[in-house]
Image (spheres, grey):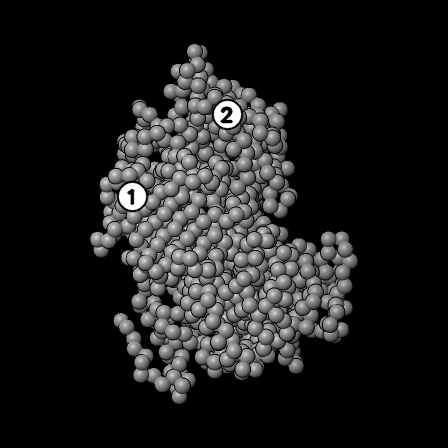
Amino acid sequence: MPTVTETYSMGVPVEISRIDQELKKLWQDSAGAMTRASLMNLAVYSEEPGSLNKNTQLMAKITENHACRAIVIEADCNATEDGVDAWISAHCHVSGTGSKQICSEQISFLLKGGCTTLLPSIVFSHLDSDLPFYLWWQEEFREPMNPQLWAWVDRIIYDSRDWEDFRAQMRLVESAEEEAKQRMVFCDLNWTRLDNVRFAIAQFFDHPASHHHFGKIRSVRIDFAPGFRSTAVLFAGWLAAQLSWRGEKADVANELRFIGSSGRKIDVELRERPGEPIGEVAMETAEVEFLVTHAKCGDLLEVSRGKPGEKRMPQLMPAAKNDPVSLMGEELMRGGPHHVYLHAVNCVRELL
Amino acid sequence: MRLSNASLDVQRYPICRNLRNLWDNMNRAAEQPEPNPLREGLSTRPVPQPCNIVIFGATGDLTHRKLIPALYNLAADGDLPPSVAIVGFARRKKSDDEFRSDLEEATRKFSRQAVRDEIWKTFAQSIFYHQSDFDDESGYKSLAKRLDEIDKNYGTRGNRLFYLAVAPDQFEPILKHLKAAGLNETCKGSWACVIVEKPFGTDLASARDLNRIVCNSFSEEQTYRIDHFLGKETAQNILVLRFANAIFSPLWNTHYVDHVQITAAETLGVGTRAGFYERAGALRDMVQNHLLQLLCLVAMEPPTDLAADSIRDEKVKVVRSLRRWSRNEIAANVVRGQYTEGAIHGDPVVGYRQEQNVNPDSQTETFVALRLFIDDWRWADVPVYMRVGKRLPKSATEISIHFKKAPAVLFNKDLHDLNVLVIRIQPDEGISLRIHAKVPGTSFRIEPVKMDFHYGTSFGKASPEAYERLLLDAMSGDATLFARRDEVEQAWAFIDPIEEAWHAKKGAPELFFYPAGSWGPEAADDLLARDGRAWRRL
């Protein structure tokens, strides 16, 4: 009898052809005490050795809040022998009421050698029917992009922070989408990282009486942690896209300049500082500074506005966490299209 | 169109003040400002505005158990605009710090998420206490001054939300003085509104009176009548279920629906509410507001859009279409009951008349069952059975749609179970559908099976408390989940004849008794049995 795991093991090895039967058996054996739940198919693909274990741990956490059929794939493209190994397991969590265990099932695959080309077939044959298909791609994209696979993807999730060549990667995803004639939603975890800071900045301008400040912003400073420059650039892209700023060619990599609709110049300074991915954002007009900074306790943002040097009354808001489980959780929670992301990307594509 | 109110002498002509409020609101709607471009894609709900929330009855239970914990949770989740200040208004002497400390203790006890010191500290900085009697004019003048100061220091922008967490008999002095102090009006670009807690009257006359009192100070557009049932996730989901799923719409009418049942059961007795409950009873306490609101959501026609008034227009039509009964018909269609001693979950409990502060000869109903008809095109001849009661075997609020039998040919000659769609409001929010399936085997046996959707199972995220959602809506100017004046009055117009029949000196329908822990008096079962139906087993 297959074991229902509460730990992070990959579960029980199964023959590929018997996955469905074994999954069925898994639930029959545990009927009553457990409830299978699924809102989506969430496949994660990685070529990193040992990623099956690592991603199984992530899935165990992600499924606490997002019931799904998890399909975890590790591809070893350099293996000398071809082969596919598979495992099934379940991630169970006690429900809010404490009466039942809510379980998400996981199918894990290790693809070796030439079998990595079997990815679409492996994925397609194990999708939970009628549920959306989210693919979390942990690798760089490369040619040839298989249109057969992308045609099935509802949301493609990636982290552009890891990309060496943003423009080339983005081109590949966009062409895959075009070829597949599928309106796939691009979900960049690097963009998700910005959610709370964007929210904190946006709330300054909720009252219509604050809107006049938009036309007076003269400088923006964004502090980013080492390795998160692209996150900071995306943030600048967001401001530019939403406030109709046009980018000017930058002479210095971290000093960007935009031109507002009235022709005024807006200087955006990117500063590398140790700490959170986006440690602080300050936007200045001649009269007022809007400041979002990480509070000392780390998981809160301190937001305040006022004249520079003047005593302020900061408020606290939740800050985003930068671990993959939190980022994925946030991304899966939001749903919807990401037009704003694409506009932001288009504004700073050349700078990324 | 821009409306001018410059020439109105609002001091001399009170009606002009109301007109001015109305015009201000119309202007607000007509001059919809440009949306905040930085909000695009960040939130799918109207954005709450900075404001001063003034709570009358700030030392009371509702403030401590519900309102402040709800506001704290909103702050902790980052949903509350930073520029929100809370001013507690009550009679007792207290300093700001004492008030904050009381609220902190209560929030630690009642909040759905653990209180974090650093968040509380920042949140508490914007909480103030204003001591005054409700009928002391000077208290309101000083309140106005204080609110102006807070506006200046906290960026609350002159927006005011007054929350009346007090008994209805306090509404009049509070609202009168708010008006006298000019607090019902604001400068251009700001707003003032009032949230009124139920009960909205005890009958049609008192509801009209209450509405008149409110309306003297605040226009209908500025008034939010809170019914926390409507803030529950599943109640909101009724409209999504009906109008976002094409499969239900064609079946949602007299041609396919046999009958509808709505049950709101609780294991609790009257507890500490005897004083109120003795005067109200189950009909006024639950049916007039919560249950009729649920019925409206189930039975209403699709609104033209999701604007508050479009939805409320359709809801009020349902109440208006409820068949009215003569006094004799009331006895045949409404059953009232009162619990006697019994047991809940195996523990013995006393009868209602033995509860503390209850009249030993009390005629107050703790249980009501009704057989209703909505006389409109969609629901003609479809009975709606409602029951509500205390000290029932389990706590559950559910709506069930019982579909008509399939034709009695082929498989259905011996089948008695109907297809049932159940919407569970609380607890274990979710939806289930009962269908028929063949039992595996060589014989041809058909049994009902249940397809079940549980919110808690599918969505890990806990739903916000109803008060969180409703407070946020009021701060955003979204009145969709609040009852409108005509809805309340129409509901009372339906309830009043029943109360009158029950309290008639001669020929009043009988009050039935049921042991605590049972599903109500037998007469309630007879109500359905007469139609060849039975209450759903919960």
Q: How many marks?
A: 2
Q: Residue at x 39, y 51 (%)?
A: A282
- Residue denoted by label 2: A52
Could you say which disc has been placed on residue B15 in the image? none
- Residue denoted by label 1: A256
Question: Label 1 amino acid?
Answer: Leu
Taking the view exactly as shown, the residue that stands out farthest to the bottom is: B12
Q: Quadrant of the N terminus of chain B?
A: bottom left
| Between discs 2 and 1, the one toward the N terminus | 2
Q: Residue at x 47, y 21 (%)?
A: A49
Q: Quadrant of residue B310?
A: bottom left
Taking the view exactly as shown, the residue that stands out farthest to the front is: A309
- Label 1 marks a residue whose chain is A
Asked whether residue B509 appears in the rendered view, the answer is no
| Rendered location of residue A138, percent (x, y) | 42, 30
B283 with respect to A185 (left or right): right
Asked whether residue A253 appears in the rendered view, the answer is yes
Say which element carries label 1. strand
